[in-house]
Amino acid sequence: MTAPADLIMVNLDSSDPAAHAAFYADALGWEVTHSEAEYAMITKDGTSIGFGLVPDYRPPAWPDTAGAKRYHLDLYVDDLAEAQERFVAAGASRPEHQPGGDRWVVLIDPIGQPFCICPRPQG
């Protein structure tokens, strides 16, 4: 049976599309396929993530129990500590609130959007 749809792209709001795309291209090992002040895109294996400029963009608070959840990305990594160090060196930050214990780590990307790094399943 053919799937009813195939995901080709996710578009994310951003205060700085080019920098946002560059951060995730580096984090994921994807290619920046478009980069302008208003819009940028990264791509791998036919799937893309786009970053569109939103004037007066305000990132969500973390944690924000009173606000509506927007989105976040979960990324598999081979080593949590090593990946955290790499992403922080690239411009991410590590908030104090960490609901995953040692199972995953929440980081905040350079424009203020949370994302999680999770250990890659073994086997």
Image: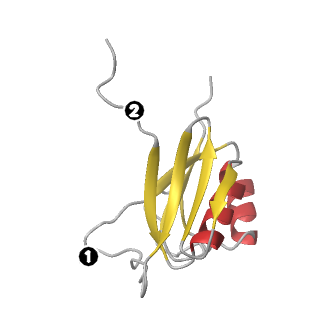
Query: What numbered label is drawn on residue 67?
Result: 1
In percent of width and height, residue 45 lies at: 61, 35
Q: Label 2: which residue?
A: 6
Looking at the figure, which quarter contains the C terminus?
top right
Q: Residues within 10 Å of mark 2 (few under 14, many from 20)?
A: few
In percent of width and height, residue 27 lies at: 68, 55
Camera sees residue 106 = yes
Looking at the figure, which quarter contains the N terminus?
top left
Query: What numbered label is drawn on residue 83?
Result: none
In percent of width and height, residue 92 lies at: 64, 71
47 vs 64, nearest the viewer: 47
Q: Nearer the viewer, mark 2 or mark 1?
A: 2
How far apart marks 2 and 1 lie (CA) works out to 30 Å
Secondary structure of the residue carrying numbered label 2 = loop
Query: Residue, x 51% and y 79% (percent of image)?
Result: 15
Of the image marks 2 and 1, the number of the one nearer the N terminus: 2
- Could you say which quadrant of the image residue 12 lies in? bottom left
Query: Residue, x 75% and y 55% (percent of image)?
Result: 82
Q: Is residue 16 above or below residue 121?
A: below
In percent of width and height, residue 114 lies at: 48, 67
Q: Give left or right: position of 56 versus 80.
A: left
Figure coloring: secondary structure
The residue furthest top is 1
Secondary structure of the residue carrying numbered label 1 = loop
Camera sees residue 80 = no
11 vs 28, nearest the viewer: 11
21 vs 106, nearest the viewer: 21
Amino acid type assigned to the residue bearing label 2 in the image: Asp
Q: Residues within 10 Å of mark 1 (few under 14, many from 20)?
A: few
Query: Residue, x 48% and y 68% (percent of image)?
Result: 52
Q: Give left or right: position of 2 versus 21.
A: left
Amino acid type assigned to the residue bearing label 1 in the image: Gly
